[in-house]
Image (cartoon, helix red, strand yellow):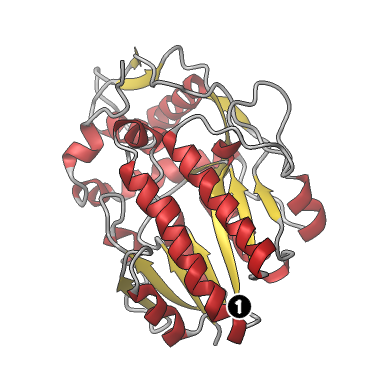
Amino acid sequence: MKKVIVTGGLGFIGSNLIEVLLKKKYQVINIDKKTYSANFYNVKEFKKNKNYRYIKCDIAHKNLSKIINRYKPVAIFNLAAETHVDRSIDGPKNFIHSNIIGVFNILEIFRKYSKNNKRSKLIHISTDEVYGDILNGRTKETHPYNPSSPYAASKASSDHLVFSYVRTYKIPAIITNCSNNYGPKQHPEKLIPKLIYNILSNKELPIYGKGINSREWIYVKDHCEALVKIFEKGKIGNFYNIGSNKNLINLDICKKLLKIAKNKIEYGKNVKIKFVKDRPGHDVRYALNSDKIMKKLGWKPKINFETGLKKTFDWYLDNINYYKSLNKKDIKNRFGLRK
């Protein structure tokens, strides 16, 4: 049975990827240092699976080398990252540590490891935010990077690092840039789970600015299927955009969730839209051109947004204990309020 390592596997995308990989009969080693956004609730359904193992480790720590050389994975999916833009505005240091120093450590280890394990691949998972504000059209993989936030800049830096190691040291690595994910197990600091939490908790629904910021949305399992496809069939040294070609403004997201909730529950009178002060440097629009992965690898998203949003709402409704497993201040606190 082929072994793979998933870094950041206690997080939102990482835990969903592990679920997909286990179903595809891979043996998965989950490496996660267990920060606020990591949650053992996310892996509870397969923590006793004989093909799953969790190891606590910071990707920037030297112990990572021992783990990789012990298990000899055919793939490392690097999802370990600080991801919340608002937190990066309040304090960029953790983003530099995980997203740059951590990736540098992985690359140094993998550079040596891949010499004797030539079939192994590093799949580095990044974001559409590296491209910056895209007011018109959709960005191809060749579009120049123009990050706006410390988070996006740290991810752009990691992408450049990975590609430099491909060019200089010929390591077998691939870089992916994905649009906004949504679905089960996402921390409620992010828009959709935050809105769902507030609906279920009879709280106001905060929307930045006028709610016109546009994002491209993809259901998390579709993203995970794309990552596996890229590992199995992707070309070394390439970048692959992963998106749905479905853009919506934040205000419309909120209205759609209220409509879903109305058909599921009787929510409280405090549940109403409240426009709040925008965060600094807030990009207006992200949009990817994902023709490359669709044409070259035959992947396409399966879950349309309306279906995915209902599945997401149902998961949180059926997993109220998920919220109880989190620190309340991480749910309620407002970050990114710089003057």
Q: Is residue 72 left or right of residue 275?
A: right
Q: Is residue 326 above or below residue 149?
A: below
Residue 249 locus on image (x, y percent)? 54, 23
Q: Is residue 323 above or below residue 266?
A: below
Disc 1, SS:
loop
Q: Is residue 261 left or right of residue 91?
A: right
Residue 316 locus on image (x, y percent)? 34, 45
Residue 296 locus on image (x, y percent)? 81, 57
Q: Which quarter of the figure has residue 52?
A: bottom left
Q: Is residue 97 above or below residue 123?
A: above
Q: Amino acid at mark 1?
A: Ser
- Quadrant of the rendering where the C terminus is positioned: top left
**Would you name the residue on which mark 1 appears?**
120
Q: Is residue 304 left or right of residue 200?
A: right
User: Dot 1: few (<14), some (14–19), or many (≥20) neighbours within 10 Å?
Assistant: many
* Closer to the camera in the image, 156 or 121: 156
* Residue 273, visible in the rendered structure: yes
